[in-house]
Image (cartoon, rainbow, N blue to C red):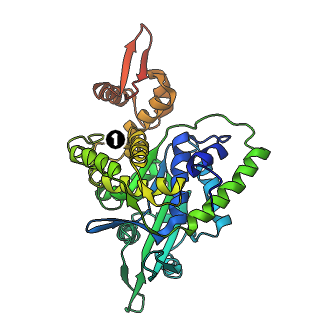
């Protein structure tokens, strides 16, 4: 059956155009919806490794300013209408394991005819802190294990017995703030483990002002076509193949990627090592967004790399406030304020943060940001002006 939309993600972005969240949030929400529908039924064989289209995506930004929960809402509604298995927003570790175990379904490989079990679950958490809890090392360890979609995952029950989940697939999308990342995650966890498996999508403010975010008749019709195409995507199963042109581009990029990281930040060292894995998972999703043919082309590579690159420009801001320096927290928030307003005065900053830092501390913060080339500083007789320097 032919798709109703040439590309699901592009059509979804039209569907949610009359909403306030930043464009980048909307793109990653669309990616997560497709990943949720593909489940563990689709995969890419990559030598000794097999990649599945699950992703851990966390929308990050200041509280109340970037419309993180608003961005997640439309995708969540589509998944609920589809009947895709989703975990509760607030749930204990034991209950989450039960949810995963009871999500077992049977997949028939369209080529070999083999029947395989898979336990596919989507975690949709507009308040990621509520879901993770504080320093919940056991749950974070589970999520780290589940990311790689193990064939069998063994766990110990309360009665000291063991149990197994066959064909693990966990897809996650959540939202949080840089401040809550600092308080929720142990400092030692930043840089590796779970955080290396997460795409942190940072925006400092909403995309636009929409006083009347109501669906037009055309958008209502578009929603119906999106659901119809999602049903087809949900029925997809089997192995994705790559073209020779895709492989040529991949080899050229991969051989240079290690010496050309997107940014220098030790807190993202684990992410940078896993960047090729993120790119391949994203390519599966982008291919499924367009067609049922399960072929990954050079076009999907270019599109996936473009989306990652645009996201990585602000990704380090997700960890603003995470560090050992005493002023790391206030520096992160000052950076977010400067970026959001484009230009502020020193008086503005004093009025914003007088309860956290005195004049001397803020002067040191601004001097450090200027040395980092994060901002320009200009002086008049009565005021200091701090202007955000956009990264090229």
Residue at 31% x, 46% y is: 249
Residue occupying the far right of the picture: 217
What x and y, as percent, mark residue 15?
66, 46
Q: How many marks?
A: 1
Of residues 9 and 166, the one drawn nearer to the viewer in this rendering: 9
Crowding around mark 1 (Cα neighbors within 10 Å: few <14, some 14 to 19, many 20+) is: some
What x and y, as percent, mark residue 64?
58, 44
Of residues 362 and 40, the one drawn nearer to the viewer in this rendering: 40
* Residue 243 in view in this figure: yes
20 left or right of 264? right
**Local secondary structure at mark 1:** helix
**Which residue was labeled with disc 1?**
328
99 left or right of 332? right
Residue occupying the far top of the picture: 381
Residue at 33% x, 57% y is: 277
What x and y, as percent, mark residue 301?
39, 47
Residue at 79% x, 46% y is: 217
Q: Quadrant of the N terminus?
A: bottom right
Figure check: 205 above or below 86? above
* Residue 128 in view in this figure: no
Of residues 261 and 114, the one drawn nearer to the viewer in this rendering: 114
Q: Quadrant of residue 257?
A: top left
Of residues 235 and 193, the one drawn nearer to the viewer in this rendering: 235
Figure check: 157 above or below 67? below
């Amino acid at each position: 059956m032919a798709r109703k939309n040439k590309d699901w993600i592009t059509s979804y972005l039209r569907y949610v155009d009359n909403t306030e969240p930043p464009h980048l949030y909307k793109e990653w929400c669309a990616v997560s919806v497709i990943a949720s529908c593909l489940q563990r039924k689709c995969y890419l064989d990559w030598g000794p490794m097999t990649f599945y289209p699950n992703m851990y995506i966390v929308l990050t930004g200041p509280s109340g300013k970037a419309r993180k929960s608003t961005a997640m809402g439309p995708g969540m509604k589509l998944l609920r209408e589809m009947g895709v298995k989703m975990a509760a927003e607030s749930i204990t570790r034991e209950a989450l394991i039960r949810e995963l175990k009871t999500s077992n379904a049977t997949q028939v490989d369209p080529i070999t005819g083999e029947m395989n079990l898979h336990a596919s679950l989507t975690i949709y958490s507009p308040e990621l802190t509520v879901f993770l809890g504080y320093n919940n090392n056991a749950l974070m360890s589970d999520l780290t294990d589940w990311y790689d979609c193990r064939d069998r995952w063994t766990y110990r029950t309360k009665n000291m017995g063991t149990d197994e989940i066959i064909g693990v697939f966990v897809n996650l999308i959540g939202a949080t703030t840089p401040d809550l990342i600092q308080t929720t995650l142990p400092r030692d966890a930043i840089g590796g483990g779970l955080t290396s498996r997460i795409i942190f999508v940072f925006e400092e403010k909403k995309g636009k002002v929409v006083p009347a975010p109501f669906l037009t008749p055309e958008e209502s019709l578009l929603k119906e076509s999106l659901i119809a195409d999602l049903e087809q995507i949900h029925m997809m199963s089997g192995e994705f193949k790559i073209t020779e042109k895709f492989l040529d581009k991949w080899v050229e990029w991969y051989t240079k990627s290690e010496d050309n990281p997107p940014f220098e930040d030790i807190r993202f060292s684990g992410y940078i090592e896993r960047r090729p894995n993120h790119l391949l998972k994203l390519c599966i999703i982008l291919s499924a967004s367009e067609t049922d043919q399960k072929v990954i082309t050079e076009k999907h590579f270019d599109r996936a790399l473009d989306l990652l690159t645009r996201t990585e420009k602000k990704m380090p801001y997700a960890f603003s406030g995470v560090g050992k320096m005493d002023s790391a927290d206030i520096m992160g928030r000052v950076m977010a304020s400067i970026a959001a307003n484009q230009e502020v005065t020193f008086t503005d900053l004093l009025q914003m943060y007088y309860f956290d830092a005195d004049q001397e501390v803020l002067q040191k913060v601004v001097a450090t940001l200027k040395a980092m080339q994060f901002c320009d500083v200009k002086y008049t007789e009565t005021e200091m002006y701090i202007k955000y320097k956009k990264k090229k």
